[in-house]
Amino acid sequence: MKTLAILAVVFAALGVLPLFVVSDVWLNSLIAVLYAALLGQAWNILGGYGGQFSFGHAAFFGTGAYTVAVLQVQYGINPWIGLVAGAAAAGLVAAFVGALSFRYGLRGSYFALVTLAFAEVLRILSNSVPFTGAGVGILIPLDPGAENLQFAHKSGYFWMIWAMALAAFLAAWWLGHSRFGARLMALRDNEDAARALGVSALRIKLGGIVMSGVFSGLAGVFYAQHYLYLDPGLAYGPAISVESLLVPIVGGMGTLFGPLLGAAALHVLSEVTRDIFGDAPGISLAIYGALLIFIVMFLPHGLAGLGRISARRLIRARPA
């Protein structure tokens, strides 16, 4: 319960910030951090807690984004219904990918490549079929109002992403304190031993990937309603998959607050590099790659692990 109390305090503190922040620039920064934290926690549920590394989470993100956009633009369905449909559609795609992968025992690099392939297949399909706008993309009409999941002020989008991120972090907390989560982590640590103890690997890993897919789909829904435009490269492109896995790796995989730490750190790094290098194409991905190499080599447990090590050293150094 201590961790849950800390989580409540952190999100309560984040929730009151719009009362004191009047600048849209700062609100945009808060929205960007929470959006990246949601993406990262969605990946962390499967990759951090479940040990199943995905290189294609854009498949779930893009499905959620396109579902709400297509339902709203092509069929006039309210985006609140589209939000639920987008999360459900992303979960179904995740279940399909998981069933094909886990039923045949794919794990490690094989599973990562399968998810990458699915994201690329969906990108090609959305680039070809007319109802997604094909290569031109799909533009969502501007109609501000809470009933349309569009807001005249940035604070509305802040509360939207705040609620989605909170739901993802509560799900991650539940994983760390439930039997399902314990079984998922047992499969991560030693799948053969967990199977020998009677853990149903297929069922548990399917549950993990569906949960991960649902939250990635919610991130896609937010993206669509916030930016009001989608094309295949944005929705299913590799940038989303890279951001999804980089955030928890930098912050600390398999930890509750790792994605939030990673999202904040990467946002600061992104702003600093933009100030130094401008909008030079490819520079951010190059810096992210260098950072990933550094984290893997010197901070395998991410920023959360660094915080734990520092706290232990302070406790040891404290005089008796």
Image (spheres, rainbow, N blue to C red):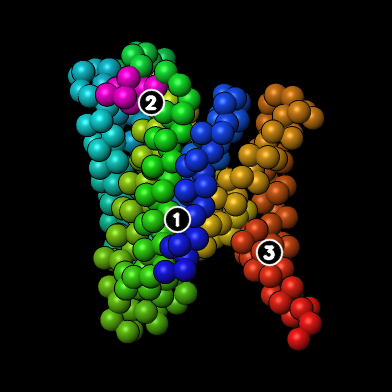
Q: Residues within 10 Å of mark 2 (few under 14, many from 20)?
A: many
> Could you tell me which secondary element the residue under label 1 belongs to?
helix
Q: Which residue is mark 1?
A: 8
Q: CA distance from mark 1 to mark 2?
A: 27 Å
Rendered residue at 37%/46% (across/down): 215
Q: Identity of the amino acid at label 2?
A: Gln
- Tell me where the magenta segment starts and ends, as one range: 145-151
Percent coordinates x, y for residue 50 in the rendering: 42, 64
In the picture, residue 180 is in which quadrant? bottom left
Is there a contact, CB below 8 Å, between mark 3 and mark 2?
Answer: no
Percent coordinates x, y for residue 38 in the rendering: 46, 45
Percent coordinates x, y for residue 9 in the rendering: 49, 55
* Mark nearer the N terminus (3 vs 2): 2
Is there a contact, CB below 8 Å, between mark 1 and mark 2?
Answer: no
Between 199 and 10, the one nearer to me in the picture: 10
Between 2 and 79, the one nearer to me in the picture: 2
Q: Identity of the amino acid at label 3?
A: Leu
* Mark nearer the N terminus (3 vs 1): 1
The quarter of the picture where the N terminus appears is bottom left
Q: Is residue 308 above or below residue 41?
A: below
Instruction: Answer whether residue 236 is visible to the viewer in this image.
Output: no
Q: Which residue is mark 2?
A: 225
In this rendering, position of residue 318 left or right of residue 10: right
- Decide whether residue 159 is among the magenta residues: no
Q: Identity of the amino acid at label 1?
A: Ala
> Could you tell me which secondary element the residue under label 3 belongs to?
helix
Q: Which residue is mark 3?
A: 306
* Mark nearer the N terminus (1 vs 2): 1
Q: Is residue 73 above or below residue 299?
A: above
Between 135 and 270, the one nearer to me in the picture: 270
In this rendering, position of residue 43 left or right of residue 82: right
